[in-house]
Image: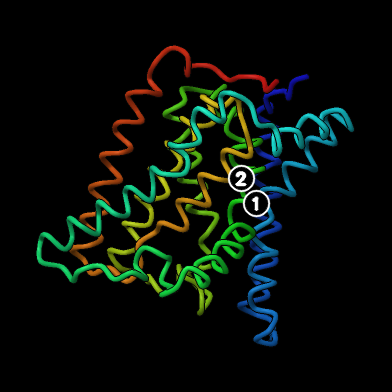
């Protein structure tokens, strides 16, 4: 079984559907008088644009068999995934711990327990955040970004170039959320924190591509990696803290670039 690489026209349709659906739904948060109880459901509903776009285009091009192959990549656990699972689960928590320690060593505030738990002071609170983080990002986005679009972009150039392009598109897709009060993007505003967030998106895109290549296009791997990156994202940093984490993310990205430059990653792949 295999999933075909999207053609350029299909990629254009994918991005149009992804942006169109998400931005239309998120516009309700800006222009419609919604009850406060609807804020999170509408916010999360809008994030499913990439997943919906991928499903629509796969069914339209490949039918039921293509859809079955695509869905298999959500649940397939094989040797490649297991070999990369420690990296997937630990790379961004390790970056978080390192960054907080370096920040403190340079005179920043010492890290609190909640800084390691997504802002929550208890493990139970962190577990609740885990469920929300899984739906609002990994499950709603990765079937589209890495599950569908990435290989089509690699077919147009290199894995590194595709990662950067997709990272920039991914960042732009979030744009309406910077206008919606109550989102993490709005809280950053027009500040250095936003530039640091863009660095995070680009570095994460590169790491995602590396894991995608090494796990045979596993969507499950992409979901888990995205989840860990969200859970290990540092909160409430001052400018020095943002600089520390930006430097660490750039260092990680440069290391990944050297790996993606190898011949084995230079071409798109089908997914068994």
Residue sitting at 25 percent across and 60 percent down? 242
Q: Nearer the viewer, residue 114 or 243?
A: 114
The answer to whether 198 appears left or right of 239 in the picture is: right
The answer to whether 142 appears left or right of 197 in the picture is: right
Is the image coloured rainbow, by chain, by secondary structure, or in one colour?
A: rainbow
Extreme-front residue of the structure: 123
Percent from the top left, x then y, of residue 140?
A: 66, 53
- Asked if 200 appears above or below 159 in the picture, the reply is below
Circle 1 sits on which residue? 139
Mark 1: few/some/many CA within 10 Å (<14, 14-19, 20+) = many
- Asked if 122 appears above or below 212 in the picture, the reply is below
The answer to whether 61 appears left or right of 201 in the picture is: right
**Tag 1, which secondary structure?**
helix
- Asked if 263 appears above or below 41 in the picture, the reply is above
Quadrant location of residue 234? bottom left
| CA separation in Å, label 2 and label 1 | 6 Å
Percent from the top left, x then y, of residue 59?
A: 84, 36
**Tag 2, which secondary structure?**
helix
Residue sitting at 43 percent across and 29 percent down? 161
Quadrant location of residue 143? top right
Evaluate if marks 2 and 1 touch, with contact meaning CB atoms under 8 Å apart: yes
- Asked if 122 appears above or below 232 in the picture, the reply is below
Quadrant location of residue 22? bottom right
Circle 2 sits on which residue? 142
């Amino acid at each position: 079984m295999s999933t075909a690489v999207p053609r350029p026209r299909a990629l254009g349709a994918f991005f149009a559907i992804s942006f169109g659906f998400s931005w239309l739904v998120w516009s309700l948060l800006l222009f419609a008088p919604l009850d406060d109880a609807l804020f999170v459901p509408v916010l999360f509903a809008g994030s499913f644009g990439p997943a919906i776009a991928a499903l629509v285009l796969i069914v339209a091009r490949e039918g039921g068999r293509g859809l079955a192959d695509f869905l298999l990549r959500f649940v397939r656990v094989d040797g490649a995934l297991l070999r990369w699972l420690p990296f997937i689960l630990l790379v961004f928590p390790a970056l978080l711990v390192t960054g907080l320690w370096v920040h403190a060593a340079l005179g920043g505030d010492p890290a609190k327990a909640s800084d390691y738990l997504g802002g929550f002071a208890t493990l139970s609170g962190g577990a609740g955040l885990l469920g929300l983080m899984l739906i609002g990002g990994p499950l709603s986005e990765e079937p589209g970004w890495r599950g569908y679009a990435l290989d089509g972009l690699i077919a147009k150039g290199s894995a590194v170039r595709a990662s950067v392009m997709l990272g920039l598109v991914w960042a732009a897709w979030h744009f309406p959320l910077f206008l919606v009060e109550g989102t993490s993007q709005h809280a950053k505003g027009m500040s250095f924190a936003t530039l640091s967030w863009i660095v995070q998106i680009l570095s994460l895109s590169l790491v995602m591509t590396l894991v995608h290549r090494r796990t045979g296009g596993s969507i499950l791997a992409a979901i888990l990696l995205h989840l860990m990156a969200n859970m290990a994202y540092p909160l409430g940093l001052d400018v020095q803290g943002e600089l520390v984490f930006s430097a660490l993310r750039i260092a990680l990205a440069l290391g990944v670039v050297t790996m993606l430059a190898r011949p084995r990653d230079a071409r798109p792949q089908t997914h068994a």
